[in-house]
Image (cartoon, rainbow, N blue to C red):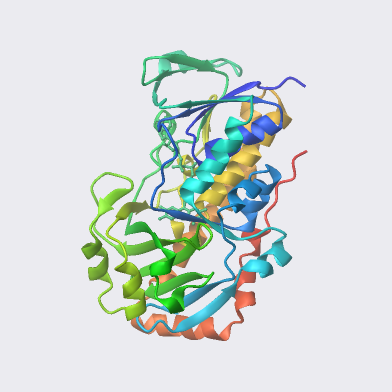
Amino acid sequence: MEHLDHTVIVGGGIAGLTLAITLAHCGLRSTVLETQQAPKEEGAGIQLGPNATRILRELSILDTLNTSAITPESIIVADARSNHTISRLPLGSWMVRRYGAPYIVAHRADLQSALLQHAKAHAKIDLRFGSKLRSINHEQEHSESQDSTLKFILNDGHIVSTPIMVGADGIWSTVRSAFKINSSKFTYSGMTAARAVINFNNLPKKLQHCVTHVWLAPDAHIVMYPIRRNLDVALVVVTPAPQPEQGWGIDIDKKEILTTFKSIHHDVSAVLQQTKHWKQWALFDPEPLPSWSEKQMVLIGDAAHPILPFMAQGGAMAIEDGYVLGHLISEIGLNTSKIFSTFETIRRDRVTRMQDVSRKNGNIYHLGDLMAKSRNMVLRLIPPSLLMQQYSWIYNWRYYPN
Ligand SMILES: Cc1cc2nc3c(=O)[nH]c(=O)nc-3n(C[C@H](O)[C@H](O)[C@H](O)COP(=O)(O)OP(=O)(O)OC[C@H]3O[C@@H](n4cnc5c(N)ncnc54)[C@H](O)[C@@H]3O)c2cc1C
């Protein structure tokens, strides 16, 4: 069968690199255009469920990541004010037994480095750092034919032609903005996430465990997990806030975080006091795009479907997208519209469900006093393994390439 032998991928993040590596595994070439010069994502961790680690293992990336990643034993959900445990959800060996792959936590820069290391090792992948897609020329792109060539312009003025371009360029995708039908509204959720990495040994002794902590408060929550073999700890603090100025990962003053959490338990407060270096992400909850593809362009990962981070699954969806699309490009051959429509058929329902569940989970996390009491009572009554099993549709997901 003839293949689209060369795919241009805009964005060398989680989705873009997973796609490039999958294509290389299938014997296909790709060029990855990445704005940044080197992996960044400082000050942030990432949790990856078995649905994502299974793919990383399939692509031989998991072992590399596991040199620094951690498999927490459980998620302790607690009240931020009393630090009383509400539920202790099983991870660790329970996850491996049930879903055949681990639930891990890692520094984002380590995930990015592991992906890059594997991408660099493949002769089929041409990585171009410091290469930003500036615009897509609509005139040149306009063509009725199925296999015409798409032309676009890079920041250095270079014009690149390709029969298939994948927008893996994140929530503020330039590729998406070139779509004629791009009517998705990017509504600010009213919440921001502040992220930081602190030293594990500086935690209060009673919190120095290999577990993920989630502390719930009205309208806010805190997530904490050890990374880098228990040397560091990743923190995420979600609070309500007026829409911040444009920016992604911008510096934020510790005082702003502490004001939201005036009445929290002293151990939890001690954690938040550990560092001045916080970065802030405004959280957006966009309406689904009517379509993820147009002509020879297709979107994957956050470019197609940003997800509120309350199920910790946006990156996992980016990994799944890259893996599925890579296999479809290899399996379907030259017909881009068939590749794109099959991709959307496989992915859209799952991703939309994930967006819904994430939104609902955020609402449950942030319930006010009275409702929070009922929530905590219910959570205490349900056996933790039963609570986790409701997410089997997430963690059990598999794609079987033809
Ligand atoms: C607070 C928070 C916590 C989260 N926690 C988790 C978690 O625990 N687990 C999880 O699975 N997910 C989590 N997520 C979601 C996850 O971060 C995203 O879903 C994931 O990063 C999406 O990957 P991506 O490759 O689609 O986009 P990105 O990671 O944004 O990558 C896009 C890449 O494209 C590049 N780029 C952008 N524009 C251009 C251009 N014009 N030309 C060339 N290159 C370009 C960027 O530099 C970047 O490298 C969290 C998100 C937030 C905000």
State the image coordinates of residue 225 (x, y, percent, origin top left): 48, 65
Q: Is residue 59 left or right of residue 166?
A: right
> Which quadrant contains ligand 1?
top left
Give the answer, above or below, for where 177 lies relative to 385: above
The residue drawn where x is 54% and y is 56% is 354
User: Can you say whether 10 is above or below 18 in the image?
Assistant: above
Count of picture labels: 0
Q: Residue at x 57, y 74 (%)?
A: 89
In the rendered image of this protein, does residue 336 appear above or below residue 245? above
Residue 243 appears in the rendering: no
The answer to which of 355 and 87 lies nearer the viewer is 87
Residue 18 image offset from top left, x and y in percent = 59, 39
Q: Residue 137, image x and y in percent?
A: 41, 18
- Where does residue 67 sit, x and y in percent of width and height? 59, 52
Q: Quadrant of the C terminus?
A: top right
Q: Nearer the viewer, residue 171 or 77?
A: 77
Q: Nearer the viewer, residue 108 or 162?
A: 108
Quadrant that contains the N terminus: top right
The quadrant holding residue 309 is bottom left
